[in-house]
Image (cartoon, rainbow, N blue to C red):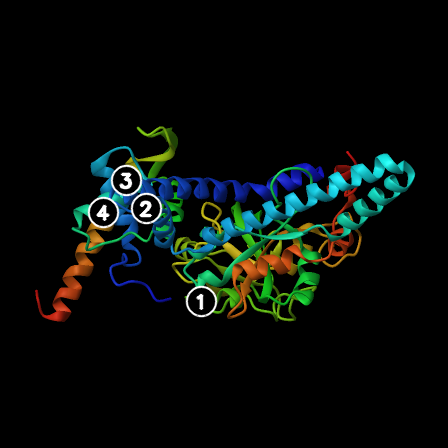
Amino acid sequence: MARPKNDILQGTLALLVLKTVADGGRMHGYAITAHIQRVSADLLRVEEGSLYPGLHRMAQEGWLRAEWGTTEKNRQARFYTITKAGRKQLEIEEESWARLCSGVGRVLGYA
Amino acid sequence: MSWLARLRNVFRADEVSEEIEREMAFHLAERTDELIAAGASPEAARREAERRFGSDLLQRDNTRDRDVLVWLETLLGDFRYGLRALRRSPVFGLAAILTLAIGIGANTAVFTLLHGLLLRSLPVTRPEELARIGLTNLGDGPPAPFIPYRMIQQLRREQRSFVDLSAWREQSVAVSDRDGMKRWHQVGLVSGNAFALLGAQPRLGRLIDESDDVPGGPAHGWPVVLSDGFWRDRFAAEVSGTFVQIVGVTPPAFHGLWPGVEPKLYLPMQFLTVLQGRDDLNSPAPTSVVWCAAIGRLKPGVSHAAAGVEMAASQGRLLHEFTPPDFLRNPGSKTLA
């Protein structure tokens, strides 16, 4: 599977989505994508085809609450909010990301 | 359980898929607006929005719609001609229409390609080659996303567009934990070629293969493959009173075909005969139909559109041979009405 280089590293999608929704409140998938792209200064791009299955999985895990609603443009969209379990998961993911970074950093000799 | 209730059960997985497709449609609309605002023409904006989904399927679907329109217009013309003929010679006309109706019934498009976007997002080898085949002609409404198991087997032999077709089925099964507690878990029953066709590599051990999916089970007992998540949580040793052997673990990134219905365990399709206590898979009796999702991988160089055409041209014979009569749309009624 050849993927563009700036696609999000496997496993970090949950971390980025949970962080985004934790800060942003009630958001639909498109807003989540746009936020990640903007905040990362276009360094990160959510692969759109895998975002929605991912969101459904996170809702199933109980990390996100999902409901259909209407946007300002009067379109039907599914809105996500973070749950208590989601915040807990976010902590876990942040911690393991920090560990990963420090590990990789050491191997590369930056830390 | 009534046929309808059973069918509805089978369809539940599909409601999730439909919901996601609805979400994706919203995403496409928003992205298109944004690109138009940035100066793109509406058409270019739409194309670009679709491309970012990694899909040119939607484009092809539009083309097919136009073909259908032409076909409908032609049909309408034939129908008008038929009416004029009927006025001139009622008896001959009626006989001709009946013949036409029977002919159309036998040749109506039976199979159709479904769900492009979802399969394309699976973490497997070249997901863009995957296609799901649905069945038209069942009741009213959209094409049915599930096909009787034995029909899939026959279609496997007759089709030419796909490398192969596999069968997937999800159902709840009571699984005993190590401490003897029984819990209901979502289980995936897969034909022997299903994982090989996806190109999925096991995290541990091996995945279900052709030698596992034989009537009565392989000589060394039924094998079970655990999902990565289930493997990490805990593992099971007994499924519905039958001891099964853990042979492998699915790749960590693989969560089943459909979001929201992730199976915890995978067993060979033939294990269904153990679960049901009867042989619905291989029995030729027309009332024992096992509905499965049919997933194919296109041969290199065959487009989704071309495969769609082959599927649509398949003979109605398969439909009548493998579907219980209650499910069939009466082929003649629509034309005569």
Q: Are marks 3 and 1 on the same chain?
A: no
Distance CA(mark 2)–CA(mark 3) = 23 Å
Question: In the image shown, does B287 or B119 lie closer to the viewer?
Answer: B119
Residue A44, percent from left and from top = 22, 54
Q: Nearer the viewer, mark 1 or mark 2?
A: 2
The tag earlier along the polypeptide, 1 or 2, is 2
Task: State whether residue B174 appears in this view.
Answer: no
Q: Are marks 2 and 4 on the same chain?
A: no
Q: Which residue is mark 3?
A: A31
Distance CA(mark 4)–CA(mark 1) = 32 Å
- Residue B95, located in which quarter of the rendered image? top right
Graded by Cα atoms within 10 Å as few (under 14), some (14 to 19) or many (20 or more), the crowding at tag 2 reads few
Q: Nearer the viewer, mark 2 or mark 4?
A: 2
The tag earlier along the polypeptide, 3 or 4, is 3
Residue A78, percent from left and from top = 37, 35
Specify the amino acid type for callout 1. Pro
Element marked by disc 2: loop
Q: Which residue is mark 1?
A: B202
